[in-house]
Each structure stands twice: as structure tokens, then as C-alpha cells.
Image (tube, helix red, strand yellow):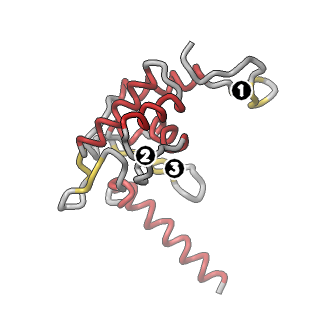
Amino acid sequence: AQAENESRSDNIRLGLAHRAATGTSGLYTRKLYGYKKNKDGELVVAEETAKVVRNIFRWYLDGDSVLGIIKKLAEAGIPSPAGKEKWNKRAIETMLVNEKYTGTVTLLDSASHEFAYQMKDCIPPIITEGEYREVQEEKAKRSNVVTDDNGTHRSNKKYSSKRK
């Protein structure tokens, strides 16, 4: 029974990897804030929410903190992706690191994370790759997490998520 379960698990893993490699995985077209599915099940830009995504990226690059962005969204009366009045930090932080907004989707092998399957231009982009890279650089500048000879730890300087 154990060998059968392991064999079934291996077959499922191989099937998922094959679909990721051939571009037929449903994860490439998984719904995301700023997009909607058309009648064929493909992701297309939902202009109203895509505008919110663009604003979030722009506000962050303009120096707003995640909490500052949440405040702006609340003032504008824009509901969260879950339909709630207030956005949470995790939703904004996840959005800012999600490469899918550039039209590029990367899938990792769930078991070992050794293999990555990447498909460019599989969905229409909401932001440019340049904007995405700028945000990642800005996030690194604002972070107080450092990696040195002693490992990864918080720096001893005062932290502010706002641009200096």
C-alpha cells in the first residue's frame, strides 16, 4: 500500500511538472486581482481593478509605505480583493512581489523547488517589467533585514518602510 501511494504521488508530481513545462497548467491562468476571465477561461485585464494595481505600484515608488497605501485605498473607498472595506498588509505586500503583473508566470516544482517553469507573455501585463524591478529594488532599500557573515538578521538601525 505504501509503494502504491508513493507511485501515485510520483505520477501526480510528473503530471504537474509536464503541464507546467508544456504551458497547459491551470496555474498560469489562475485568477488574480486586476484580471478577470473571459468566456474562454483566459485572463484579461479588468481595467477598473488594474488601475488600482497600477496606483499601488506607483504609490510605493513615490515613497508611500504599505500602511500609507492602505490608508489611501480606504480614503478612496476601494474594497480589498476579498471585498472587505479595509485592505490588509499581506495583500499589498503580496501584490508588490507578484511577477505575474508583468505578464510573466513562474511555477516552482512543489516537492523540491529545484525546477522552475517560466512562461513570459502568457497573460496581458498590467505593469512593465521595469516598474516591477524598481519596486523590488525599492523594497530591498527599505528593508532592515541584512545578510552578512553572521547570517540573516535585522539591522540595528531604526527601520522605516518609507523612502528616505
Say which label, 1 or 2, has the lower sequence index: 2
Residue 51: percent from left, percent from top: 29, 35
Residue 137: percent from left, percent from top: 51, 22
Is there a contact, CB below 8 Å, between mark 1 and mark 3? no
Instruction: Residue type at mark 2: give it.
Output: Thr
Instruction: Residue type at mark 3: give it.
Output: Phe
Q: Residue at x 43, y 38 (%)?
A: 74
Instruction: Please say if 151 is above or below 31.
Output: above
**Disc 1 secondary structure class:** strand
Residue 134 sits in which quadrant?
top left
Q: Residues within 10 Å of mark 2 (few under 14, many from 20)?
A: some
- Horizontal side of 9 relative to 151 (left or right) equals left
Instruction: Residue type at mark 1: give it.
Output: Thr
Along the line of sight, the residue nearer the viewer: 102 or 15: 102
For mark 3, what is the residue?
Answer: 115
Residue 26: percent from left, percent from top: 35, 61
Closest to the camera, between mark 1 and mark 3, is 1
For mark 1, what is the residue?
Answer: 147
Q: Residues within 10 Å of mark 3 (few under 14, many from 20)?
A: few
Say which label, 1 or 3, has the lower sequence index: 3
- Horizontal side of 43 relative to 132 (left or right) equals left
Q: Residue at x 28, y 45 (%)?
A: 123
For mark 2, what is the residue?
Answer: 106
**Disc 2 secondary structure class:** strand
